[in-house]
Image: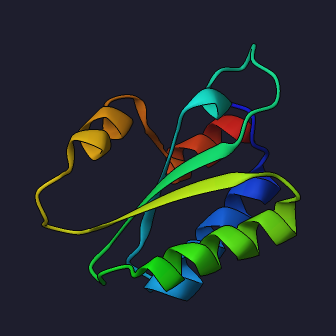
């Protein structure tokens, strides 16, 4: 995984600040490949709150500003039927809390 503990904390804190303390964050995509280089940070954020387009934009802006890296954000509401893309993303996604343990 190509995120350090500080980056993970920033991502989790931002998601919780915008979508509430119950927000859970998963990382998927190229940043999971330790042998890769570059790439954006692909995040799936689940929350009991329905994340709006503005919420996603705010999270994206805040994380990109803090980390100086490109970020893609997908928000999903807890308990809702997953979209086909969400199913694909979750298939290989890693919860950031577990990722933080690996990065430490």
Q: Residue at x 50, y 82 (%)?
A: 55
Compared to residue 41, the image places residue 89 above or below, namely above
Image: 6 above or below 32: below
At 53% from the left and 59% from the top, the residue drawn is 73
78 sits to left or right of 29: left
Where does the image place residue 86, in percent across and percent down from the top left?
30, 45
Looking at the image, the residue that sits furthest to the top is: 35
**Name of the residue lying farthest toward the right:** 68
For this view, does 59 lie left or right of residue 85?
Answer: right
**Which percent across, then down, holds residue 93?**
43, 37
Q: Tell me where residue 27 appears, x and y as whole percent.
A: 53, 44
Residue 58 in the figure: left or right of residue 24: right
Quadrant occupied by the C terminus: top right
- Residue at point 18%, 52% (across, down): 82
Q: Is residue 45 above or below residue 2?
A: below
Q: Nearer the viewer, residue 4 or 59?
A: 59
Q: Quadrant of the N terminus?
A: top right
Residue drawn at 60 percent across, 67 percent down: 12
């Amino acid at each position: 995984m190509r995120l350090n503990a500080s980056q993970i904390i920033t991502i989790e804190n931002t998601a919780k600040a915008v979508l509430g303390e119950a927000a859970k964050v998963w990382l998927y995509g190229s940043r999971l490949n330790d042998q890769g280089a570059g790439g954006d940070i692909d995040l799936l954020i689940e929350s009991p709150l329905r994340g709006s387009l503005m919420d996603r934009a705010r999270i994206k802006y805040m994380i990109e500003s803090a980390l100086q890296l490109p970020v893609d954000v997908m928000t999903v509401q807890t308990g809702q039927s997953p979209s086909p893309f969400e199913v694909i993303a979750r298939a290989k996604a890693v919860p950031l809390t577990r990722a933080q343990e690996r990065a430490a």
